[in-house]
Amino acid sequence: MTPGRKKILAIDDEEDILEILQFNLSAEGFDVDTAISAEDALEMNLRQYDLFILDIMMGKISGFHLADRIRKEFNIQTPIIFLTARDTENDRITGFNLGADDYISKPFSVKELIARTRAVLRRVSHENDKTDTLSDEFIVNEEKKRVESEGAPLDLTKKEYEIFSLLLSNPGKIFPRNELLARIWGNDVIVTDRTVDVTIARIRKKMGDKGHMLKNKSGYGYYFDE
Amino acid sequence: MTPGRKKILAIDDEEDILEILQFNLSAEGFDVDTAISAEDALEMNLRQYDLFILDIMMGKISGFHLADRIRKEFNIQTPIIFLTARDTENDRITGFNLGADDYISKPFSVKELIARTRAVLRRVSHENDKTDTLSDEFIVNEEKKRVESEGAPLDLTKKEYEIFSLLLSNPGKIFPRNELLARIWGNDVIVTDRTVDVTIARIRKKMGDKGHMLKNKSGYGYYFDE
DNA sequence: AGTAACTGTAACAGAAATGTTACAATTTAA
DNA sequence: TTAAATTGTAACATTTCTGTTACAGTTACT
């Protein structure tokens, strides 16, 4: 288990495919999580992964559509390998437009799977060193749940970290208080809106002279702005 | 790996296959136990074996799934040979070759069975002799299940050792309590989260003035930090 | 400008998480 | 079978985190 152990999320609605992926890639030293549907995947903390392996044909939300949301909505540029039974020209083109990094046709050989996985990760590993650099000013390390600014840790608490990394992942996007409450605190917890304000204030304080980068849009909510 | 006679656990829901395995491998000088289901196998002391032979297709819990649990939940890295039925074998599995593991297709020849068994055990036994130096401060000897610090043994108990070596192998990575419980204690054991805290405290104590290197991230879990 | 709504933050109170100890229960070794 | 070692848990101490309030400052709007 070297420091560079890669995390992979496999998403497929076929249980047996997930098992094969998980078992074989784990054996190769990858850290593999699975999701049985696009909906499930969207509930997970997607930012932690180094690679998605994604079946194109799934129930309600197709693999293409999910890839689109991951890239556009969450602004996550993690590489994606598509699993596909259809081997048509159209699919390949659509996939590459979405930034697919590779295709594997089912049924696939385990050897091929591992080879392509390694290839994709090797390709991107030079660009991204496991710490997500989401802004010029801040480095978010999901594994360590840490944020660094100019080499110094920000030392955020759990709630603070979760708000900060969410806002930072969506620069410019305004999050209303009730959305932050729902996503960070959870829907069943009953706390005042003001709690958000205070938490934001605490983050700003720890950000020092960069505190102004967490902005408020009066009447709407908070957002990160570089 | 224990010296001398090798212990093998064969797991299959077909009685006659178990008989064939037991008879032939015993004749070759191996010490063979059997389990008629994954559930039965999970009740056994899995750590004592040098090799598992495991049918992929079994009742409730598939071979893949069982293998996964053995590896992840029990944190046992003992090699596994899979049995697969010839007619379900396809491209997915062709070319499968991962470290110490192997495949044998049913129906198999006794000659092939013995050859692969010997091969796997030989391969693994060469990976001996590894005192892993994982940090500047600590030397972990996986074979002896010992940790040394400045020449002096830390004298960790089993649980303590397993937590310590896991954290040390993943410096900086935060392990939530429930993940530690799953990986060290196993998923079916019901113990409090606080058990982890106490075990950590005991390790820290034995680490003396280096105890602070086992850190806690409030709300998340524990990690090793140099 | 005036005023009502909105936001920022300090200060306090309370809750939650973590560290530590003591002791009981269980396992292991002799 | 004993005794020793290991493990689990309750209880308490301590630290850290969170929520609310109060009030000052800001913004939006007429």
Image (tube, coloured by chain):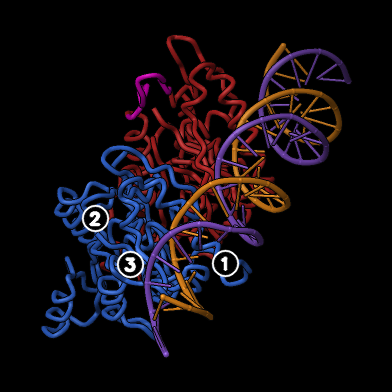
Chain colours: A blue, B red, C orange, D purple
| The N terminus of chain B, quarter of image | top left
The amino acid type found where label 3 is placed reads: Glu
Graded by Cα atoms within 10 Å as few (under 14), some (14 to 19) or many (20 or more), the crowding at tag 3 reads few
Report the span colored magenta: B127-140
Identify the residue under disc 3: B89
Closer-to-camera residue (A40/A138) = A138
Residue B60, disc = 1
Taking the image as shown, residue A29 lies to the left or right of residue B219, namely left
Where residue B44 appears, as percent x and y from the top left, is 63, 45
Q: CA distance from mark 1 to mark 2?
A: 48 Å
Taking the image as shown, residue B119 lies to the left or right of residue D15, namely left
The amino acid type found where label 2 is placed reads: Ser
What chain does badge 1 belong to?
B
The amino acid type found where label 1 is placed reads: Lys
Between disc 3 and disc 2, the foreground one is: 2
- Residue at 38 percent across and 45 percent down: it is A146
Residue contact at pointers 1 and 2, CB within 8 angstroms: no
| The C terminus of chain B, quarter of image | top left
Q: CA distance from mark 1 to mark 3?
A: 20 Å
- Residue at 42 percent across and 71 percent down: it is A221
